[in-house]
Amino acid sequence: MSRRRKTFPCGHKGYGRVCHRCDQQNKVIAEKKQQKQRWESTFDRDPIDLKNLPAHVVVKARSIIAGLESQKNYRDFNGKRLRHNRWIISIPVTRNYRMICRDCGSLLIPEAVLSHEQYNVDKPGC
């Protein structure tokens, strides 16, 4: 006895009760949505806004913030004080991004992560 292929509502043809091709695709989409939600939920714990930055910049910025919170010196991250305002410290995150921190005596408070273009156009702290 031969089996009959049926056409599913999605347009695919097969022998089962559900279209396995669409079922697998829906599982992948659902997994990607969960992964994105987990990634976006991590931004709630950040002291500064990192949402509009690329993922590798966010990871590096978070490692710098964690180091500063554990009382590491900003010079360990190649940070430098600005010449026009010595209370502002610029720490390179990547080649194209800088983290701006304000020196408040014994601790550094991160204020923003700027792209190199934003950093050059309006000097922070002016």
Image (cartoon, rainbow, N blue to C red):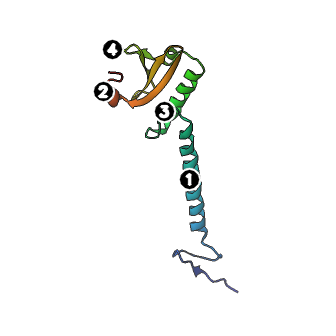
Badge 2 vs badge 3, beta-carbon distance below 8 Å: no
Front residue of 61/17: it is 61
- The local crowd at label 3, few if under 14, some if 14 to 19, many if 20 or more residues have their Cα within 10 Å, is some
In the image as oriented, which residue stretches furthest toward the right?
Answer: 1
Mark sitting earlier along the chain (4/2): 4
Tell me the distance, in whole angstroms, between the alpha carbons under discs 1 and 3: 26 Å
In the image, which is nearer the foreground, mark 1 or mark 3? 3
In the image as oriented, which residue stretches furthest toward the bottom?
Answer: 1
Q: Mark 1 highlights which residue?
A: 32
Mark sitting earlier along the chain (1/3): 1
Q: Mark 4 highlights which residue?
A: 84
Q: Is residue 78 visible?
A: no
In the image, which is nearer the foreground, mark 2 or mark 1? 2
Up-down relation of residue 18 to residue 82 (above or below): below
Q: Which quadrant of the rendered structure holds the C terminus?
A: top left
Under mark 2, the amino acid is: Asp
Mark sitting earlier along the chain (2/1): 1
